[in-house]
Each structure stands twice: as structure tokens, then as C-alpha cells.
Image (cartoon, coloured by chain):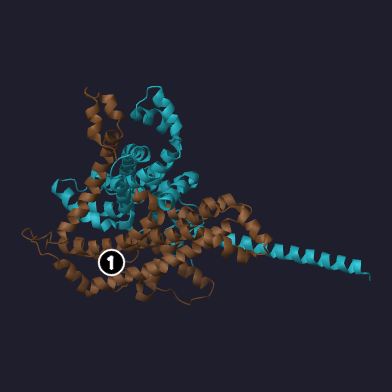
Chain colours: A brown, B cyan
Amino acid sequence: MRAPGARRGARFALPGWSTWLDRPGFLAALLLVPTLVLVFGVLLYPILDTLRLSLTDRVLSQPDSGAFIGLGNYLRALQDPEFRASLGRTFYFALITVPAETTLGLLIALLLNQRFWGRGFVRGLIILPWAMPYIVNGVMWKWILNANYGALNALLQQIGLIDRYHIWLGYPSTAFNFVILANIWKETPVAVILLLAALQTIPQELYEAARVDGANAWRQFWSVTFPSLRPVIAVTMVVKTVWALKEFDLIYVMTGGGPANATNVATFYTYLTTFKFLKFGYGASMAFIIVVLSLIIAFFYVRLISPKEVAE
Amino acid sequence: MSVRSLRANSAAGGRARRRRRQLVGRVLLYLAVLAVVAWVLAPFAWLVISSVSTRAALTSKPLQWLPDHIDLSNYIDIFVGGGSSTSVHRSVRAGALNSVIVAGLATLVSLVAGSLSAYAVSRLRFRLKGAFLATMLATQLLPTVVIIIPMYVVFRSIGLLDTVFALMLADIAIILPLITWILKGYFDGIPTSLEDAARIDGCTRASALFRVVLPLSSSGLAASGMFAFIIAWNEFFTAFILSSTLHSKTLSVIVAEFSSKVGVDYVAMATAGVLTSLPPVLLALFFQRYIIQGLTAGAVKG
């Protein structure tokens, strides 16, 4: 690091405006101001304030609440069977969706990497679910799964797989799995796009060399493709895990946390506690427990993708 | 039979076998592609069909998959208004306007602020650069429920609840780190020799940014802008918490409300759903190259 004092001492005249603009440190500070103000003001301050709130017993409907109670909320949340169950559902959600989306994404990426007529069109189309708003995705699947007029019921009955219409979102056992299906439909394209981009960077020479060595397609996949893709697969899985911990929109629209709490994941339970029951302090502590879990994953994420950049 | 003709026979047999195997492979390949296309298209296609169908057709049993005629009345009621337009159509119109304002302004502000900060992290050496980048990345991993609680408290106390301004600020907090991160990648790819030449000609670093780097990264600005716009347009949770009337409710919030109403008009709901997804879906389909660049830059290169 340079010593600014020494540099300033060498010059006696007050540097002009344009000279200031040419100083990397000063210019950097100036250029970063808008972003810092916006991101810190709207993001980091709220996060710190959530931390403060989480140490109080603030209830929005009681003006005299807000006393400091230390870690009371955290201890209560960790012992709250409802919150613990909601965390369990969040992990179940992540444990199913992440491997499913990554595997399906890999298979589709391998398929779209083959030569076939209309490849450009199909590659373009695959982005559609990603672009759809989360809410519309939820509304769309809720409509498809509708108990009285849903397309799934109609389809399954017309091809003879069921004899009566089912209330897919009305039973705890099926509701959560259909929410998971809707999530897989929407989020798989991200994995496809990331893995397809990675597939295209694998040098053809590696495959040629493998063929010369007599490797069949199966062997080529395990000895060339998979090792080359491994870093991207890892990043995809970590990003998706963090996203899975955040899932809210789909559950809000499709099931509202029901039936019988079957889809009441951690973010949804936090939302209910905070904005329905107005227990802002208690809700903030739950939010922070989710943050800590996300940051643990984030730590591995940052280490994975840019070890040099961050160490700089 | 001579040895030679025997060999020729088996070679021909091998070629035929190989050709047959290739043919089977091609057929399986196209079947798999067809399955993927159907899986991606079918749900959305059903939403689109529902939006131009009639209530009678949609509620018939056995289900009438295709309507007898295409009924665009819901689209017309939303866009043109007039006698048959209901409160549903009016709220979709108001929500669309709010969505355009909120996502559009959030993207513009983030592009301006983001290109400045991306230039700083790409070209200048300064203390805490690593910390800054790591913070930008970490913000992407936070559940929105964490920042929304105090945001709600603050906006409530300064009277900004239920304004497009509050929604816009919340969107900026989400997309600005992303834009900074993507643009940094673009700036890193522009050789510094061009700026050096400009500086020899008397440009300051700041004017080099505006005269050399920004014009050269127009595709980066387009890519990150479109990517950010789609994310802002699709944002639901912050809008849902911060808005309470048609003053600021966005399309996502309006659509979510429809679906939870009892006795919902399925055709109108599907129409609102299609209209809400059209801007991001069309942007993504027409400018997929940009979007793919944004996605891969945002997640893989980091």
C-alpha cells in the first residue's frame, strides 16, 4: 500500500480538481459513493437493524414494547417446535430440489450440446421458465393443479390414470411435492444454461484424445466431461441451495403454508410471525437464524468461485 | 465363397448395423428433445390458452382443451377499458404502470451507480476492495425477509410505505450489487491500453471512463440492464410487504391477490398472468445472448 502522506508532502501546491480526479484512491471513493449509499442505506443498515430488533421484544401493535432481552428470542426460536419443523421443511425442500435440478439440468445440457435440427431454437426456449415471474409460476401451477378444473386432473383422467379428480394441493403429502415440482420446472433452466456454457468450453482435443485411447461415450463422459464440469456443478449446487433457503413466493401463492402447515417453510414462518402476528423482535431473530445458515453456505460459495479475488 | 467376399459381406453388415444404430440414436435424440420442449412449453402454453378461452370451456368436464374460438375480450378490457372492464382489469392496468415505473427506474439508477462502482473495482487500486466485492456478493445470498423487517419499520416512520419510491429503493438494493458484479466482468475484458492512450492525450481517468470504457461496453450495459430489469420486474416479496393499495402495487402483487380470491375468474387470472410474464419472457427470448451472459457472469465467474 502506498503512503498518501509521503506523496502529498512532495508537492507543495494544492492539487487541482482534475489532479484529484486522477488519484486512484480518491476517484475510487468518489465512484463508489452512489453504490455505497444505496446498498448500505437500503441493505446493510436494515440488516444491522434487524440484528438490533432481534435482541428486543418488539411487537408492532404494542407501542411500549421493545425492551432489550438479549438472546431471549434466539433461545426461544431454537426451542420453538414450529420453527424447528419449518427449518426441517426448508432443508427437505433444498435436499430434493437442488440435486434434482442439477441432475436434470446436466442431462438437458448434454442433450442440447448434441447436434440436431432446431438446436438454436430449443436452447433459446429453455430460458422461458427462468424469465417467468415467480408469482405467475405459482399461479400457473396452482391453476394446473386445480381440484375442480385443473389440467393435470383432466389429463390424467382422460388417459385413464385416475378415475376421479384429486385435490393435489389439499393433502399434506402431495402439496409439498407439487410445490417442489413447480420449483424444479422454474429453476432447472439456470442449471442448464450454466452447464451448457461450461460444456462449450471443454476443448474438443480432450475428446479426440479419449477416442484415440478407445474410450466409448460413457467413459468419455466420466473421464473428460464430468471432471471439467465439476467446478460449475459445485457452484450451481451452492447457489441453488442458498436460493432454496430463500423460497417464499411460490409457497405464498400455491399453498399459503398449508395444508396443515405441510409447506410452512422457515421464511414463510418468519413472515407469519413478523407481519401477521406483528412480533417484529421474535421474527427478526428467526430471520437471522436463516441468515447464519445462508452465510455458512455463502462462505463456501465465495471460497469456491473467487478465492483470489476475495483474498486481494 | 472366397475369403475376400466373406470379409466384404461382414463389412457391409457392420456398416448397416452401424447405420441402424445411428438411426436409432437419432430417433431417441429427437424424442428426448421433443420431451424437453413439451416439458418447458406445456405449462405456459396452457396459461396462454386459458387466457383466450372461455369460462365455460375451462370448467367443462371432460375438459375442452382448445376453445371453439379465440376470445381476446380480457386483453381488450385491460388495454382499452370501456364498458365491460371491471375492477380486475383496472387493477391490472394500474399494476402494469407501477411495475414499469418501479423496475424501469430501479434499473436506470442501478446502471448509473453500478457502472461507476464497477469501473472503480475493475481499474483502480484501493483499500478494502476485496471486502467491497465480497459484501456485494454476500448481499445476493440474504433472504429478503431479513432486510424487509427494518425496511418496513423505516419506511413506515418516514411515510414512504405504499409508494413506488419505496419499492424502487428495495429493488435497487437487490439488483445494484448484481449489476456492479456483471459490469466489472465486462470492464475487466476491455484492454487498458485504450485508456492509457486516451490519458496520454490528456484525458483524466474519470473522462476515460465516460469517453472510452462506457462506449466500449454498451453490450455489457445492455446485458446487465436487461438482466436487472427482469429481476426487478419479477420481484414480489418486497412489493408485497411495502405496498397496500393501487398507488404502488405491482403486477406480481395483483396477480398473487387474484389467485387467493374465492370464486376467481380463471380467464382474467390467466390473462393477468400472461401479461405479467410477457415483458421478461420476451426480453429473455429475444435477447437470450445477453441474458445468458448475465446469468453466467452473475453465478459462475462471480
- Extreme-bottom residue of the structure: A163
Residue A282 in which image quadrant: bottom left
- Left or right: A57 with respect to A121? left
| Residue B179 image offset from top left, x and y in percent | 36, 44
Is any atom of residue B5 visible in this view? yes
Question: In the image, what residue occupies the spot 27% across and 51% down?
Answer: B239
In-front residue for pair A252/B297: B297
Q: Nearer the viewer, residue A308 or A263?
A: A308
- The x, y position of residue A240, in whole percent, is 39, 60
Residue A98 position, x and y percent, is 42, 65
The amino acid type found where label 1 is placed reads: Ala
Residue sticking out furthest to the left? A64
Disc 1: which chain? Answer: A
B138 or B176: nearer the viewer:
B138
* Apparent side of residue B272 relative to residue B143 in the rendered image (left or right): right
Specify whether A198 is left or right of B280: right
Q: Is residue B263 visible?
A: no
Query: Neighbour class for label 1 at 10 Å: few (<14), some, many (≥20)?
Result: many
**Residue at left 10%, top 64%?**
A69
Disc 1 target residue: A266
Closer to us: B101 or B13: B13
On screen, residue A117 above or below B226? below
Quadrant in the picture for the N terminus of chain B: bottom right
> Dividing the picture into quarters, in which one does residue B55 lie?
bottom left
Residue drawn at (41%, 22%) of the image: B201
Question: Looking at the picture, how far across and down is residue B109, in whole percent?
Answer: 31, 39
